[in-house]
Image (spheres, helix red, strand yellow):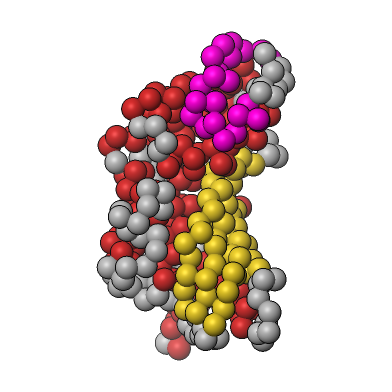
């Protein structure tokens, strides 16, 4: 009887270890902080790595080679009595089918990341309650990473993850913390997930799929057709921009994709890119210096 119990416990433990979805590197940069015991910053980094990588964010089972590669780079700007003012840069990527390359999916720099942390405190996420701004922000971006990754393989497959992120926003916004409110500013966590779930931006999610699955993942089979699919995705984004100029999602997309797009269209085989640079310059003028490097 005892042997059976041990076997069940082992299987349960093994299943839980295999359930984690993210292969995330969390880095805490405390170079700006002086006259403080650095051990708390190192403990914070260790706790966050454990929290992100050991939490089962979904009920799905991921093999090691299926985990999503991502990173969270936290820059501490000030620290006083367990209160931190910081920024967080969130990046993720996904493999390109039949190649050794990866494609960047996210590169978000969130400057509204203030939180409290007591050394060695347990970090635990409960989807039905608000624990802290630290836990909520990290959990929010974990679900955004999962959702965008899923959308790159199948349209609407990220909905459940985005809904989980939206529930975090609903709970956190009641605290009045920065980054969670629709009255705060137009480019924050609230608008990021709100727009991802909005019917208005449904074409945006379709563009993510077209760009990655029909585009990048098809390059090993037919490079010219794959490039044309990527142009089609950019045309979809251009149409969205006409109706919703300066949408936060456009910034999110091109902050991750600008260099990759230039690389794709700077070599053969040639495809018709008439008007492409002009469209890119209108959608993402901040990257205009990059778009001029696209070869005709």
| Residue ID at (59%, 70%) | 76
Residue 294 in view here = yes
Helix, strand or loop: magenta stretch: helix
Residue 288: horizontal and vertical position, in percent? 60, 29
| Residue ID at (61%, 65%) | 75
Residue 285: horizontal and vertical position, in percent? 54, 31
Q: Quadrant of the N terminus?
A: bottom left
Is residue 5 or residue 113 the one in the foreground? 113
Residue 35: horizontal and vertical position, in percent? 68, 84
Residue 155: horizontal and vertical position, in percent? 39, 36
Is residue 247 or residue 56 the one in the foreground? 247
274 inside magenta stretch = yes
Q: What is the number of callouts on the image?
A: 0
Is residue 38 or residue 150 the one in the foreground? 38
Residue 63 in view here = no
Q: Quadrant of the C terminus?
A: top right
Q: In the displayed structure, does residue 142 sit left or right of residue 34?
A: left
Is residue 137 or residue 66 the one in the foreground? 137
* Image-quadrant location for residue 32: bottom right
Q: Is residue 155 above or below residue 88?
A: above
46 inside magenta stretch = no
| Residue ID at (53%, 50%) | 108
Q: Is residue 1 above or below residue 133?
A: below
| Residue ID at (37%, 52%) | 185
Q: In the displayed structure, does residue 43 sit left or right of residue 164?
A: right
Q: In the rendered structure, which segment of residues is drawn in magenta?
A: 269-291
Q: Is residue 97 above or below residue 192?
A: above
């Amino acid at each position: 009887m005892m042997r059976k119990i041990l076997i069940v416990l082992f299987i349960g433990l093994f299943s839980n270890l295999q359930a984690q979805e993210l292969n995330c590197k969390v880095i805490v940069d405390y170079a700006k902080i002086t006259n403080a015991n650095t051990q708390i910053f190192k403990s914070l980094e260790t706790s966050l790595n454990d929290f992100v990588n050991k939490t089962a964010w979904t009920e799905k089972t991921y093999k090691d080679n299926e985990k999503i590669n991502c990173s969270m780079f936290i820059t501490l700007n000030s620290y006083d009595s367990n209160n931190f003012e910081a920024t967080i840069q969130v990046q993720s990527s996904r493999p390109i089918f039949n190649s050794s390359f990866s494609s960047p999916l996210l590169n978000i720099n969130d400057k509204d990341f203030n939180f409290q942390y007591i050394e060695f405190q347990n970090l635990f996420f409960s989807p039905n309650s608000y624990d802290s701004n630290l836990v909520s922000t990290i959990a929010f971006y974990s679900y955004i990473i999962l959702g965008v990754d899923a959308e790159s393989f199948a349209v609407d497959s990220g909905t459940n993850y985005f809904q989980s992120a939206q529930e975090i926003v609903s709970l956190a916004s009641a605290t009045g913390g920065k980054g969670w409110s629709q009255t705060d500013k137009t480019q924050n966590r609230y608008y990021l997930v709100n727009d991802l779930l909005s019917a208005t931006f449904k074409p945006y999610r379709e563009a993510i799929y077209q760009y990655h699955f029909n585009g990048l993942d098809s390059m090993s089979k037919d490079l010219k057709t794959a490039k044309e699919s990527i142009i089609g995705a950019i045309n979809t984004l251009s149409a969205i921009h006409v109706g919703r100029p300066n949408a936060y999602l456009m910034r999110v997309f091109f902050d991750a994709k600008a260099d990759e797009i230039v690389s794709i269209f700077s070599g053969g085989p040639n495809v018709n890119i008439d008007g492409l640079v002009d469209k890119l310059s209108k959608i993402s003028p901040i990257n205009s210096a990059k778009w001029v490097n696209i070869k005709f």
